[in-house]
Image (spheres, rainbow, N blue to C red):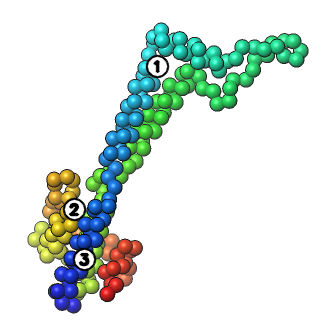
Amino acid sequence: MSSQEYEKDIKRLVEKVAAIWDSEWSPTPRKKELECIAKELRDVANTLDHLGAAQTDIESLHDKKGDPDPVPGLDGYPIRPPAPFGWTSYKGTYWAIRDLAESALEAADALPSPHTKRAAPYAALCLVHLRCKHGYPRPLISNVSEAVVALRSILDRSGVYFKPGTPYSDEHVRGLLSRALKEFDPNFLPPGYEWIWDQ
């Protein structure tokens, strides 16, 4: 195939990578929200755990609700009614709040890293497939290799950056291409890559 056809495919790749980048969700706002909730829950638990007159009054009244006064039984002897279903004591409540705070932090930690983006790895694997399609040799991994320079150009033209204001470094670009080569199978196109051979 001609270099014109290769450049046409590269242009299509740039457009697709830019579209993926623009549509990607960032976990940073959600992470901040979860961390804020965890802090608020911890503050509440710490307040309840503090030894003070107000806390004592709350604990006394709260626990009394879960320990109803005895009532006369059928035989005339007093019996103690069961605690309301699902009732939790004062101490149990603030420990449950602490557990919620820990769960909020775990939820924040479980979010993907903001640097774990799909656009850059997608660009790298597509480039490897395109080079194979157009008869180019297996890419070399060096800062000045044609494939590394091409991938850096694709990322720049697509507006893809490592983090705000910071483009992908040579080391990161080499890493992207290296991982793409390990994943590359000339006989298999993952979902989302079919366009490479659709013409």
Q: Nearer the viewer, residue 92 or 39?
A: 39
C-alpha gap between disc 3 and disc 2 = 15 Å
Q: Residue at x 45, y 11 (%)?
A: 52
Q: Which type of secondary structure does the marked residue at label 3 adopt? A: helix
C-alpha gap between disc 1 and disc 2 = 48 Å
Q: Residue at x 87, y 12 (%)?
A: 76
Q: Position of residue 172 (x, y in %)?
A: 20, 61
Amino acid carrying label 2: it is Val
Q: Which mark is residue 49?
A: 1
Judged left or right of residue 120, residue 65 is right
* Among numbered discs 1 and 2, the one appearing first in the sequence: 1
Q: Position of residue 66 (x, y in %)?
A: 65, 21
Q: Residue at x 48, y 33 (%)?
A: 99
Residue behind mark 2: 160
Residue behind mark 3: 12
Q: Position of residue 179 (x, y in %)?
A: 28, 67
C-alpha gap between disc 1 and disc 3 = 61 Å
Above or below residue 24? Residue 199 is: below
